[in-house]
Image: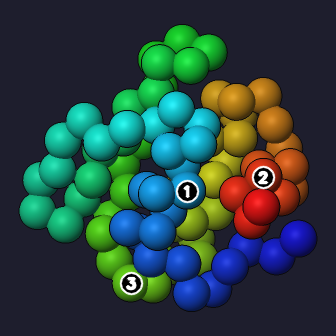
Amino acid sequence: MRIPRDLSGADLVKHLGQFGYAVSRQTGSHIRLTSQTHGEHHITIPNHDPLRIGTLAAILDSVAAHQGLTREALLQRLSG
């Protein structure tokens, strides 16, 4: 599955909520999410529209590694 090219930071924050991520703080245009599932994990997402592909790929890789999934499996769960 391909990485979506038109995903905004705000949309990604909403989608990651299903994995237990919640906004812990925001500084300027960067949103910090924290998850307590499978141990504590923090990620920072720029609130840009759209997110750059490399930035999105790095975020997805970090979340997938923490959840014990591949990036493909994570994308399938995020897309529905």
The x, y position of residue 38, in whole percent, is 62, 15
Q: Is residue 20 visible?
A: yes
Of callouts 1 and 3, the N-terminal one: 1
Q: Are marks 1 and 3 in contact (CB under 8 Å)?
A: no
Left or right of residue 27: residue 64: right
The residue to which callout 3 is attached is 49
Specify whether 76 is left or right of 60.
right
Identify the residue position indicated by label 2 in the image: 77
In the picture shown, does residue 36 fall above or below 62? above
Q: Position of residue 2 (x, y in %)?
A: 82, 76
- Please state the horizontal and vertical placement of residue 11, each as a whole percent of the image: 46, 69
- For mark 3, give the secondary structure: loop
Q: Is residue 68 above or below residue 61?
A: above
x and y, in percent, of residue 5 in the image? 63, 85
Amino acid at circle 1: His
Tag 2: amino acid: Arg
Q: In what element is the residue under mark 1?
A: helix
